[in-house]
Image (cartoon, rainbow, N blue to C red):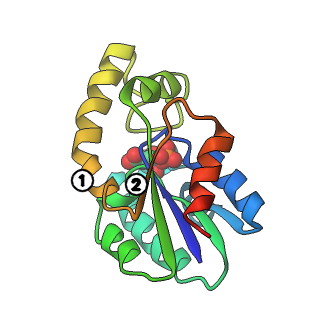
Amino acid sequence: MIVVLIGYMGSGKSTLGKELARSLSYSFLDLDDYIAEKETASISEIFKSKGEIYFRKKETEYLNEVINSSENIVLALGGGTPCYSNNMPLLINNTNVKSFYLKLSIPLLVDRLFTEKEKRPLISHLTSKEDLTEFIGKHLFERSQYYSQSQYMINTDRKTQLEILDELKAQLI
Ligand code: S3P
């Protein structure tokens, strides 16, 4: 089975994914890390030298590769992965995949991302919390329609990591 974690940048896909994989004895894979390894460049470098369109093409290509694995994997997607190409239908129509949208409110995303924006090319140019709030508000509005197609949605606001993991695992039994 492939457990796919979906959500905006900073929603905890990688942190929670690692813990979930550990407790299920699954492998953990972060799609961004996988892309960076295959392309031998960081995500920021890929955006800078080859552009976003190239990145999205590779993202879809590597997602297809990973999703067809016969291993048990917890896979953390990039925040934009579900919103491009036919990535979301690919996940929904695969009976081997369980998809979870980790939903976090805008103020909490802003707080988290403000200190972590350097390695994220889409937001690294935003210098104030106000600008970041406006950007995330619009961006999340556009992206929600894709994220909401996930099989399960978990609201993670004000929940501990343990509580979120319990909710995730409850859907996997
Ligand atoms: C992106 C999110 C990033 C990474 C890239 C683009 C996006 O992943 O894939 O910078 O479009 O939201 P994280 O969600 O892991 O930060």
Q: Which mark is residue 145?
A: 1
- Under tag 2, what secondary structure? helix
Q: Measuring 64% from the left and 50% from the top, which residue is drawn there?
A: 165
Query: Residue 69: x, y in percent?
Result: 59, 82
The answer to which of 107 and 132 lies nearer the viewer is 107
- Asked if residue 111 can be seen in this view, the reply is yes
Packing grade of label 2 (10 A; few <14, some 14-19, many >=20) is: few
Query: Which amino acid, mark 1?
Result: Gln
Measured along the vertical axis of the image, is residue 67 above or below residue 26? below
Q: Quadrant of residue 39?
A: bottom right
Q: In front of the other: label 2 or label 1?
A: 1
Contact flag, marks 2 and 1 (Cβ < 8 Å)? no
Query: Residue 44: x, y in percent?
Result: 49, 43
Q: Measuring 45% from the left and 83% from the top, which residue is drawn there?
A: 95
Please identify the quadrant where the C terminus is shown. Answer: bottom right
Whether residue 117 sits left or right of residue 57 in the image: it is right
Packing grade of label 1 (10 A; few <14, some 14-19, many >=20) is: few
Cα separation, mark 2 vs mark 1, equals 28 Å
Q: Give the labeled residue for mark 2.
A: 50
Query: Which amino acid, mark 2?
Result: Lys
Query: Residue 93: x, y in percent?
Result: 36, 80
